[in-house]
Amino acid sequence: MTTPYADTPDTTRSREGTDPAHPLLVRLAGLRERVGALVEQRSADDPTAGDPLRGLYLSEGAVRHLLHAASAAPAADSADSADSADSADGAIVALGPGDRLAALAARADLTELDTAILLVALAPDLDRTFEPLYGYLNDDVSRRRATTGLALDLCATPVHLATARARFHPSAPLRALGLLDVEEPERPFLSRSLRVPDRLIAHLLGDDTPAPALHAHLSPMAEPLPVDDDFVHRLAARLRVGPLTAYLREHREGDGLAAIGAALRAAGLDALHFSGPEDLVPDLLREARLGGGAVVLSGLPDRPGPLVRALAAATDVTVLLTDPHPYDPQWSGRDPLVLEAPRRGAGGTAAWSAALGPDAPGFDLAATVAPYRLGGDRVARAARSAQALATFEGTPLTAAHVRLAARQQSASGLERHARRIRPEVGWEDLVLPDRPLTQLRELALRARHRDRVLGDWRLSAGGGRGRGVLGLFAGESGTGKTLSAEVVAAELGLDLYVVQLSSVVDKYVGETEKNLERIFTEADRTDAVLLFDEADAVFGKRSEVKDAHDKYANMESAYLLQRLESFDGIALLTTNLRANIDEAFTRRLDLVVDFPFPDPEQRLALWRHGLAHVPCAAGIDTAPLAKDFELAGGSIRSAVVTAAYLAAGRDEPVGADDLLEGARREYRKAGRLVPGEANW
């Protein structure tokens, strides 16, 4: 009798010309034999076997044959039936290192019947000769995919067995793990079509390209930098044991991702770094199951509950979440392992050395990178930027390149609330007595070594206190307070952000605190120096509460006191009236630097420094100006600028008269009597 199976090709080779040694095709060859046997069995006494229109209509003879076959079917032995629900002709033995089906079955804990059903369902997608065979067995030439009934028949499993039918339930592994789709729910159970996702078939054939829907939401994990941390070693050891769902709360952006990357590398696991909507979670988890990797999420959405619940439900996949917010038990009924990500301290010379490669030894790398606390892949990105800058300038890599690249990686939203200054000054620009100069250098020293002293040496006061460095610069206007802050920032290789009080102070209750919180939060995650100019406006003394205004003003001060305790950055406060600063703030300061009014010797140095790059007339002497005009450094600079404009208007060098006029104008602006001109 002629049947569609008579035209079946040799079982050792596919018609598609695919490598016959592929383990999946070897399995399909065995399946083809079983399909052929079933075709022979059904066509042996089928009156419509030779009818070319078979499957398009139902004749009277075919109806009588179906009725006879149904009444003659023997009852299956219950014990044998129970065994067949869990087995499909023996164990799935791996057919070599490339047998991804066997590897997937082991990872997903699939039964032999599950694996056999999966093979039956995917056969038409790999070998088109299965399509007419399935159409014949389905008794419908248009239905060229396997159905649930056909799959059970090919697996020699009774279709009425509850445990066998349960393998197609939505909660069963095949469907719950996204490995099999049962289509056409409106049809009777045994007539529903089976489809294997294209992504699974591609994976079984050796293609590891993620599904198109996921492609835009997956980003590569940065190459992990060396992290010699006990936390990382413990996390890696736990990951080697088996699937884990963990939540790492990071103190600073990038800390958690850096720890996760290092732990995954130590555990030998790949990662899917995901940032997408909740509806893609099934595809994401399937991708992780196929590759045996871990799902990594850094930065949760505003309402993370649904996303966390969907990910935490997957007990067979490693899911690692990291975010600055504390874990909320309401996010999921199944709590992950909640951990605190280790703080990434400043410096990290080993990570920078690894990122810079052989270009690093040309300068003192440890001193250069000491102020920066870059997390995640920021160190590697900064290293690449520094090398690109050096290449662009055609010079060897220098500390200046590294510092500039590090500052670029540390940019943040602070510019919405503060004015950024990129320091272009140095210690030589300061004209100060020895005591404030020494204190300023100590301030920079504290900023460099705070992680070692407060962290490694455990000298933090506890109570949730941060590792910030706080300094107060007190002195009259123009004595160099802002310039000194810029010099400290330049010494540390950081940008200076001057807080604009107009964007902070708000007349509505509670808004000032909210604005300050935004500033401190951004400063905590940014390598920068924060400057509160005229700080007594927000750090003023608390007063006795006599009305609601006093109450809310005191609340602002109380908030600032608490926030400074937990601050991790570098903040400098300047004031012209030190007595106006609340004593509670003063106690929390690391250093208070007093800027005295310059004496005649310092004023002379300031005049000479201001004229250092200005063309001056021969024989000009600034000593009388320094002696007769009691001006602070800022006023002296303004006087020099005025003199320079006067001289530029005549297209001549700056003369003594120009400087005298500049000094007089500064006196007049201050409402002071101009000294006599007897000596001029």
Image (cartoon, rainbow, N blue to C red):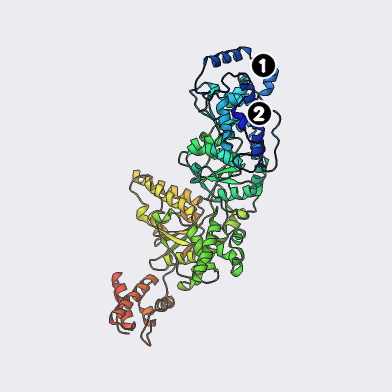
Q: What residue does disc 2 label?
A: 34
Name the N-terminal-most of marks 1 and 2. 2
**Image coordinates for residue 369, horizontal then vertical, percent:** 56, 62
Q: Check the image and report above or below for 206 versus 47.
A: below
Q: Outermost residue, bottom direction? A: 619
Of residues 628 and 606, the one nearer the viewer is: 606
Q: Is residue 40 left or right of residue 526?
A: right
> Residue 204 placed where, x, y %?
61, 40
Helix, strand or loop under label 2: helix
Q: Is residue 643 above or below residue 352?
A: below
User: What residue is drawn where x is 34% and y is 82%?
Assistant: 654
Q: Which residue is mark 1?
A: 76
- In the image, 586 versus 663, the foreground residue is 663
* Residue mark closest to the camera, 1 vs 2: 2
Front residue of this view, candidates 456 and 302: 302
Q: Amino acid at mark 2?
A: Arg
* Other-residue count near label 1 (Cα within 10 Å), few / some / many at <14 / 14–19 / ≥20: few
Does 607 sit left or right of 145 as displayed? left
Q: Inspect the image, locate mark 1, and give the three-letter code of the amino acid beneath it.
A: Ala
Quick check: can you spot residue 79? yes
| Rendered view: 677 above or below 371 | below
Identify the mark at residue 570; answer none if there is no mark: none
